[in-house]
Structure formats: C-alpha cells, structure tokens
Image (tube, helix red, strand yellow):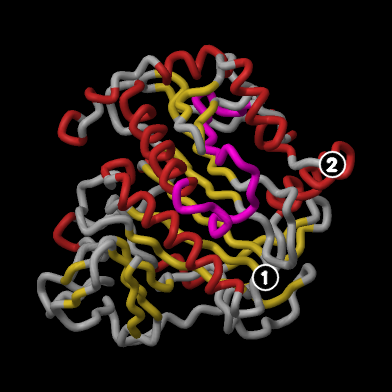
Amino acid sequence: MHQEDFMKPDGRSLTLYGLQPIRVDSEIPSPSPEPVDARPVMRWHPLRGEWVMYAAHRLGRTFLPPPEYNPLAPTSDPEHPTELPRGQYDIAVFQNRFPSLTLTAPAPEPGPAETRAGVGACEVVVFSQDAGGRLCDLTDAQMDLLLQVWADRTTRLAATGQIKSVLAFENRGVEVGVTLHHPHGQLYAYDHIPPVQATMLRSAEAFHADLGRPWLADFVPEERTAGERIVHDDGEALSVVPPFARYTYETWVLPARPVSLLSELTGTERASFARVLRDALRRLDGLFGGRMPYLLTVHQAPLDGLHPAFPLHIEVYPYLRAPGRMKYLAGTEQGAGEFANDKFPEVAAQELRAVTLEGVAREQL
C-alpha cells in the first residue's frame, strides 16, 4: 500500500492511497478556503441510555448536486475546486467538511439534558475516481486496498487517544438518504462505545466467558455444516445470510478465523475477505437486475483495550425485500426494536447463490 498525506487550504487533512506510488498533478483543493464553524454537541437520552448528536452546521451540506458539480470528483476546473486533486491514486480519505463530531469540539452551553461536546471524528472515504462506479466495481486488489485503508484509519484515529470506537460504513442509493452518488463511504470515530457495539461486546464476551472461545469459532463451523445459509465460501472468508437476519437479504461477510480488528487479518485472509465482500455486493445488484440500495457497516472491536471476543465482520442491509418493494422500518422495528422479516434466511441465501455474476456488469445496471 502506498499513501501520502496532504493539508487542504481550509486546514483539513487529506490522505491518498494507491496500489502504485502516489502522483498528484494539481494543487490540493477544497471547495472553500474557509473552514466550517463546527460546534457539535451531544445530549444524553435518559430512557434509551445513549447519546444523541447535534450538528446544526450540517444543514448547509451538499445535497444531490448535478454531475458537473460533483465535489468528490478530481478537480477539473481550478475556478471550481472539489475535494480531490488530479493524479494517480486509488482511494482518498479526507476530513468531512460538515462533521457530526470533531476532535476539537468546544464545550457547549448547558442544555435541557445532560450535555457535552461532540468529540470524535468524521472522515469521507472516496472509493474511486470514477463518478459512475460502484464499490463492487473495484478490482480484488483495490478492494483489498480498501480494507487496508479502513484498518489504517482505525489505527490513526486510535492513536489520537480520544477515540474508543470506529465505524466504517457506506450508504448507497437515494432510498437510504444518499446525498452524493459518487462511490464513497464514511468513517465515524466516537469518544465512547456506541450502543450497537456495546451490546455486541457484552454478548460476545459473555459467550467467551461461558464456553472459553470466541462466538465466531462456533458460528462459522456451524454455518459450514448447515450449508443452506452460506452465499459464498472462499476458504479464509465467507458470506452468509445469518439465521437471525433482520433484513430480507441481509448479508454478513466474515473471516473464517476469529479476529476482532481488520489490522489482525493476515495478507491472505484479507485478500479472501476482499473477494467475498466484492462477490456479496455484486450478487445483491444482480438479484433484481438493478443497483440494490443498502447500508454497509464494518464492525470492529472497541479501541479502549483488547477485546479478543469481539467478532470482526461486515453487515450489509439491503433495502429492497422484493423488486420495487422497500423494507421500511415500521412500528415494531422503530418503537420496540423487534424486526419482522418476510422471508426465511435459508430461502434468501438460496436466491443469492443463484445469481449469475456475469449478468451484473455496471453497464447493465
């Protein structure tokens, strides 16, 4: 992996990553030379036991611009700078111009609930210079590079001493609220352990304490023995519609060996993980013959110590339950946290296995 760090005119950081040495052919740009005055605030929800982020400055963020004003494309006109320079690189990461959390968030005025500064970090990860591409259009080598990038950003954010958990994710499709179509994801780094990761950690550590081994050490062999929910098995990594899937075609990508962080994967394990992830995303696009709207989340262990019981894995939540039919979160999901699924995971996995990958080329979607 090749990488090089830069500073934008407005003071934000930019890191370029590539399979080949980095080459920059223009000035390092920013849509505006002036930094956004970000003052994020956190308020405590006493009944749910969780923090809520407030970031009023985000109301002015870019929203579905026309292609000629794509801020994630390399700058073509110096008079209208974007976020990225021209040059040779595969993936770019920069600090979000409109962050929900910052490492330098000032102390807020007292509020009506328990209130504190919104301390953390928000980064944008641009997967490709190709504005019309998809994450699954990356080559296997580029997908492997992305896993290395996610691991590198996690390590860097942990080194600040202010971060306890990092979540990498991709929203895709206007159906899930995407405001920029250029293939990209985000990183949110928290100064606390968020509710989902905290619950996963408690459950995983309880399993480990009871049986003396990580949960994945049992889950992967059991799924391989059953066979009916596995979508694709690459040896050192596999994809599966979990037996407890909440979304109709929910897909997990897992390493075969239990680890808790991306940085713990060996080179061959990471390459297998990258191939399986690409395969899973291509199958979702091929399922109904169009680009599947989804939310992809990368779950790694908290960074406040060693948590070998935590299972590194990626969860993909597809938002279509049938052609043209969205999975909306209704009363039972939103009000009670109890999901209702229209299809058994075994059937969904069978349908995903049957997808012909040759039919999911980008130009056909």
Q: Regarding mark 1 in the picture, which secondary structure is present there?
A: loop
Mark 1 or mark 2, which has the lower sequence index? 1
The residue drawn where x is 79% and y is 41% is 213
Decide whether residue 265 is among the magenta residues. yes
Residue 6 marker: none
Q: Regarding mark 2 in the picture, which secondary structure is present there?
A: loop
Residue indicated by mark 1: 191
| Name of the residue lying farthest toward the right | 210
Q: Quadrant of residue 303?
A: bottom right
Q: Quadrant of residue 86?
A: bottom left
The residue drawn where x is 48% and y is 52% is 169
Residue 212 marker: 2
C-alpha span from label 1 to label 2: 30 Å
Considering the image in quadrants, where does the N terminus appear?
bottom left
Residue 20 vertical position relative to residue 350 in the rendered view, above or below: below
Label 2 neighbourhood size at 10 Å, few (<14), some (14-19), many (20+)? few
Considering the image in quadrants, where does the C terminus appear?
top left
**Residue 57: image x %, image y %?**
48, 72
**Where does the magenta region start and end?**
245-268
**Residue 241: image x %, image y %?**
55, 25
Left or right, residue 5 beside residue 331: left
**Residue 30: image x %, image y %?**
28, 78
Q: Which amino acid type is marked by label 2?
A: Gly
